[in-house]
Image (tube, helix red, strand yellow):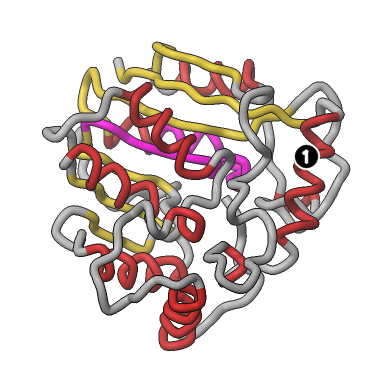
């Protein structure tokens, strides 16, 4: 997940989003679909295609209650709701992203399926055993206290429920190229190896069910949003600066074995 360098007012966030949508040839006065917006709001490795693959891996259905942790602009949540009919609660630390997510919910008519809450992944404001699925894409690399993170995820999962995630993990050598899409410098980069990550998940009561290393099969970032948006193109450049440099550094990090990308489903209990 990319980070925001600047803090915008609510009006400015909405104006930037609407301007980007109009510049791409879309009409925000007409009902938009999650696919229309996917180059803006799926800013994780692989974009919309990766979200679709994780949805299938997790076997999400219409009766599932889903929590999207670190939801960003809630693009994945809207996609899941539209594709499956499920309801999705979203927890997101950034006020900016929450404002943008609520606007995009309105533009897609999904306010009754996707619910946005500002808050921390380390203190999920939900009761125990609330969800059938917890969903997380490219978030853990920003969080240092991974034990607390995964304890919270396990806590809000119902017994037997699934934790579906895509993550950036440490490779064989130290990450040296900055800025990255998720970290401006080393102080914001909290990668651990796949083995270390899975050990933490096991200690939290989450058991591996499905695992895929997607490092060699996916582009470094959503190709539509990893570079500054050109005229007529909707992209994450609406929010985030230096996307081309960040994506290039991630590509170098992957090519030189400093990072890997994984996708998995773990089951609670």
Q: Nearer the viewer, residue 25 or 77?
A: 25
Q: Label 1: which residue?
A: 251
Q: Look at the image and say whether residue 140 sits in the magenta stretch.
A: yes
Q: Nearer the viewer, residue 121 or 260?
A: 260
The span shown in magenta is 132-152
The image shows residue 127 at horizontal and vertical percentages of 20, 44
Q: Secondary structure at mark 1?
A: helix
The image shows residue 200 at horizontal and vertical percentages of 53, 22
Q: Is residue 32 left or right of residue 46?
A: left
Q: Is residue 109 left or right of residue 265?
A: left
Q: Nearer the viewer, residue 70 or 197?
A: 70
The image shows residue 122 at horizontal and vertical percentages of 44, 47
Q: Residue at x 77, y 32 (%)?
A: 254
Q: Is residue 80 above or below residue 258?
A: below
Q: Look at the image and say whether residue 89 sits in the magenta stretch.
A: no
Q: Residue at x 47, y 80 (%)?
A: 13
Q: Give the crowd class for mark 1: few <14, some 14-19, many >=20 residues within 10 Å.
A: some
The image shows residue 196 at horizontal and vertical percentages of 63, 20
Q: Residue at x 55, y 45 (%)?
A: 44
Tally of numbered discs: 1
């Amino acid at each position: 997940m990319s980070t925001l360098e600047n803090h915008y007012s609510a009006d400015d966030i909405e104006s930037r989003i609407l301007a980007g949508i109009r510049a791409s040839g879309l009409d925000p006065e007409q009902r938009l679909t999650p696919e229309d917006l996917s180059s803006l709001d799926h800013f994780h490795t692989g974009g919309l295609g990766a979200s679709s693959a994780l949805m299938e891996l997790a076997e999400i259905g219409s009766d599932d209650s889903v929590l999207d942790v670190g939801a960003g602009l809630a693009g994945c949540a809207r996609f899941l709701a539209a594709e499956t009919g499920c309801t999705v609660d979203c927890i997101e630390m950034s006020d900016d992203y929450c404002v943008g997510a609520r606007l995009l919910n309105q533009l897609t008519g999904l306010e009754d399926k996707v619910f946005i809450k500002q808050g921390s992944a380390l203190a999920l404001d939900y009761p125990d055993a609330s969800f059938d699925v917890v969903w997380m894409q490219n978030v853990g690399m920003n969080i240092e206290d991974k034990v607390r993170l995964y304890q919270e995820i396990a806590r809000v999962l119902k017994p037997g429920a699934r934790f579906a995630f895509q993550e950036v993990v440490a490779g064989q050598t130290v990450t040296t190229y900055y800025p990255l899409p998720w970290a401006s410098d080393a102080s914001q980069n909290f990668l651990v190896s796949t083995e270390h990550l899975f050990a933490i998940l096991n200690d939290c009561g989450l058991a591996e069910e499905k695992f895929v290393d997607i490092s060699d099969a996916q582009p470094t970032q959503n190709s539509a949003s990893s570079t500054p948006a050109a005229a007529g193109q909707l992209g994450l450049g609406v929010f985030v600066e230096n996307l081309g440099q960040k994506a290039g550094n991630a590509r170098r990090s992957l090519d030189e074995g400093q990072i890997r990308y994984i996708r998995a489903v773990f089951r609670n209990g």
